[in-house]
Amino acid sequence: MKKGTFFEDVYSLCKKIPKGRVTTYKEIGRKLGRKGQVYRAVGVALNRNPYKSVPCHRVVLSNGRVGGFARGVAAKIKLLKSEGLLIRKDKIVDFDEKFFSFE
């Protein structure tokens, strides 16, 4: 992966998540080759996302829960549902099937 700033690297990966699929903060950190609690830094990057073309709503928690969103959880859920994802009690239904890995 071409090296840029950490935030730009996060945004670049996020753009690769297909519509109707989700990945996790941890998976993005893993793909970037980072260890430890990098998922927090990924969350900060996505919270500060200045690009409309970066689908940061497609990044969720490792347990399948929706997690936070700069425009609010309800907005994130609405976007995910508009892409065909089913959500119950703030959790992705069939999370394992909808999970996108960067492998």
Image: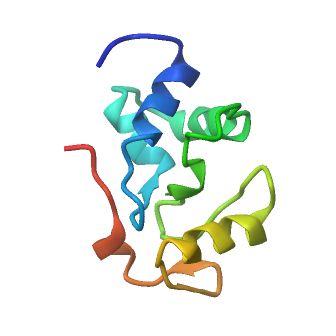
Across and down, in percent, residue 32 comes to 37, 27
Front position in the image: 72 or 15: 15
Tell me the residue at 64%/87% (across/down). 89
Task: Identify the image quadrant of residue 95.
Answer: bottom left
Q: Is residue 75 above or below residue 92?
A: above
Front position in the image: 65 or 49: 49
Front position in the image: 86 or 65: 86
The image's colour scheme reads rainbow
Judge from the rendering whether residue 25 lies leftward or rightward of residue 68; answer left or right.
left
Tell me the residue at 34%/64% (across/down). 99
Across and down, in percent, residue 38 comes to 52, 33
Q: Residue furthest left?
A: 103
The quadrant of the rendering that contains the C terminus is top left
Tell me the residue at 28%/51% (across/down). 101
Q: In this view, does 72 lie above or below 1?
A: below
Judge from the rendering whether residue 2 lies leftward or rightward of residue 68; answer left or right.
left
The quadrant of the rendering that contains the N terminus is top left
Q: Is residue 28 above or below residue 88?
A: above
Judge from the rendering whether residue 69 lies leftward or rightward of residue 38; answer left or right.
right
Across and down, in percent, residue 61 comes to 54, 60
Q: How many labels does the image show?
A: 0
